[in-house]
C-alpha cells in the first residue's frame, strides 16, 4: 500500500489507479470493514489524525479530482462523506523519498512521463499534507 505524500498529478496512469484502489482499501480499514492491513505503516499518519475517516476521505477526493481532470471515471460515491478541514504534517524527507521512488518507477514503466518530471527536484505535496522539515517518516519501510 502506498498512500503518496506527493500530489497525484505526478502519478502515471498505473500509479493513479493504484493510489485510488489502495486509498479505498485504507478507507475500509479505517471504517473497520476489513481485517487485513490494520497495522500497515502507511495508515499510521491517518490513524493518528484527529479524524481518520475524514482525512482518508480528503485524500481520496484529491485523487478523484485528478482522475476527473484526466477524463477517468472513478466513482465518487465510494468516498466516505466524512470531512476533514485540517492538514497532516509530513516531512520534507518523506516527500523527497517518495519522489525519488516514483521517478524510479516511471523510468521503467513510463519513459515519457519520466522525461517530463526528471528535472523537477521537489514536487508539490498532496493538499492534505503540510510539509515540515525532517527526515523520512518513522513509519516508512526503506
Image: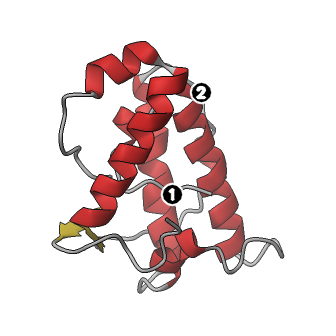
* Mark 1–mark 2 CB contact (< 8 Å): no
User: Label 1, on which residue?
Assistant: 3
Kindly indicate the quadrant of the structure image that contains residue 28: bottom right
Position of residue 99 relative to residue 25, above or below, is above
Image coordinates for residue 86, horizontal then vertical, percent? 29, 73
- Residue 12 visible here: no
* Point 34% across, 46% down: residue: 99
| SS category of the residue bearing label 2 | loop
* Point 69% across, 59% down: residue: 25
Instruction: Give the CA distance from mark 1 to mark 2.
Output: 20 Å
Position of residue 52 relative to residue 66, above or below, is below
User: Label 2, on which residue?
Assistant: 73
| SS category of the residue bearing label 1 | loop
Q: Which circle's residue, 1 or 2, is located before the other in the chain? A: 1
Q: Is residue 115 left or right of residue 141?
A: left
Image coordinates for residue 38, horizontal then vertical, percent? 71, 78
Q: Which quadrant of the rendered structure holds the N terminus?
A: bottom right
Q: Tag 1: Cα neighbours inside 10 Å, few (<14), some, or many (≥20)?
A: some
Query: Looking at this rendering, what residue extends furthest in the right direction?
Result: 35
Kindly indicate the quadrant of the structure image that contains residue 37: bottom right
The foreground one among 91 and 55 is 91
Q: Is residue 7 left or right of residue 138?
A: left
Amino acid at each position: 500500500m502506498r498512500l503518496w505524500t506527493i500530489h497525484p498529478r505526478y502519478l502515471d496512469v498505473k500509479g493513479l489507479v493504484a493510489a485510488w484502489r489502495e486509498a479505498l482499501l485504507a478507507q475500509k480499514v479505517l471504517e473497520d470493514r476489513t481485517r487485513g492491513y490494520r497495522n500497515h505503516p502507511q495508515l499510521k499518519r491517518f490513524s493518528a489524525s484527529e479524524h481518520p475517516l475524514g482525512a482518508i476521505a480528503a485524500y481520496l477526493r484529491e485523487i478523484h479530482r485528478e482522475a476527473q481532470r484526466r477524463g477517468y471515471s472513478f466513482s465518487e460515491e465510494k468516498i466516505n462523506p466524512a470531512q476533514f478541514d485540517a492538514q497532516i504534517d509530513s516531512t520534507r524527507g518523506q516527500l523527497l523519498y517518495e519522489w525519488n521512488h516514483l521517478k524510479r518507477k516511471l523510468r521503467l514503466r513510463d519513459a515519457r512521463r519520466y522525461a517530463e518530471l526528471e528535472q523537477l527536484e521537489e514536487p508539490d505535496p498532496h493538499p492534505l499534507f503540510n510539509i515540515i522539515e525532517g527526515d523520512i517518516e518513522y513509519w516508512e519501510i526503506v
